[in-house]
Image: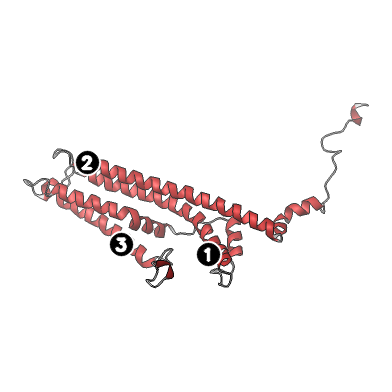
Amino acid sequence: MGPDDRPHGNEDREEIPDDDPGDRFGQNVGEAVASDPSAMTGMLGHFYRGQLHRTTTWRGRLDQTSYWAVTIIAALLTWVFSSSGNPHYLLLVGMGAMVVFLVVETRRYRAYDVWRERVRLLEQDLFAGVFDPESEPTHPDWRQRLAADLRDPSVKTPMLVALARRLRRIYYPLLLVLLASWLVRITVFQPKETWRTTARIFGISGATVVMGVGLFYLAMTAVVVYGVVSRGEREFHEREQTDPWRE
């Protein structure tokens, strides 16, 4: 056999026709699974467990950020109140650190909410209907919603709303602890000096420092109020006293 008789590249490969049955099955596999109740049931179970695992993983990341914030606050309070010579402005540094943790946790919360919304959609419209077939689904188009989100995942919670939620639930109480500690540190902890003197930082007058802290907390309070006023449907609510589960 001469050199010209040898096969070159893909010339001898058999081309698969466009109407090949195997190719059609690959394109319509979703439709095939949806039309088979047993296959659909098994797939939904695995899908729910996968989404729940993602939700749990991101929830752990949220908790990890909160744990670090609490640890830093405890270390700062211990250090600042251990001696009158330790600078009070470390508590202000702690306030700044809480803002950094708040921003990080807000970003994580938005990612966590993507998976949480999918889990809640399945629970509200699929599993609730299984346990109570006569009830109407919360979202009649839940399958279309879920399919659209799987094709094009998107963040459900705006940045400001997520920031307000994490601030109200976690970081605003921590910031209040730091504020109360700082006020005690510049007043009661230094009884021989006025607060204007003890609040000074690197040549900045005490009144200016107090005003800056006050404006900072006023802004944080405004964000908390915005979160309380603008929050949508509550995920959890208290049951009525007449609810049979409480009997």
Cα separation between marks 2 and 3: 30 Å
* Residue 5 screen position, x and y as percent: 91, 31
* Residue 165 screen position, x and y as percent: 38, 58
Q: In terms of secondary structure, where does tag 3 sit? A: helix
In terms of depth relative to the viewer, which is nearer, 141 or 138? 138
Kindly identify the amino acid type of the residue bearing the numbered disc 2.
Answer: Thr
Q: Residue at position x 20%, y 49% from top?
A: 181
Residue 205 in view in this figure: no
Q: Earlier in the sequence, mark 2 or mark 1?
A: 2
- Tell which tag, 2 or 1, sits nearer the viewer: 1
Kindly identify the amino acid type of the residue bearing the numbered disc 1.
Answer: Gln
Q: Quadrant of residue 219?
A: bottom left
Placement of the C terminus among the 4 image quadrants: bottom left
Which numbered circle lies on residue 222? 3
Q: Relative to 223, is 49 on the left or the right?
A: right
Q: Earlier in the sequence, mark 2 or mark 3?
A: 2
- Residue most extreme to the right: 1
Q: Which residue is mark 1?
A: 124
Kindly identify the amino acid type of the residue bearing the numbered disc 3.
Answer: Ala
* Residue 240 screen position, x and y as percent: 39, 71
Q: Relative to 99, is 17 on the left or the right?
A: right
- Residue most extreme to the left: 192
Q: Relative to 157, is 202 on the left or the right?
A: left
Q: In terms of secondary structure, where does tag 2 sit? A: helix
In terms of depth relative to the viewer, which is nearer, 39 or 2? 39
Q: Are marks 2 and 1 in contact (CB under 8 Å)?
A: no
In terms of depth relative to the viewer, which is nearer, 128 or 166? 128
Up the image or down, 50 lies above or below 9; here it is below
Are there few (<14), some (14-19), or many (20+) residues within 10 Å of tag 3? few
Q: Which residue is mark 2?
A: 78
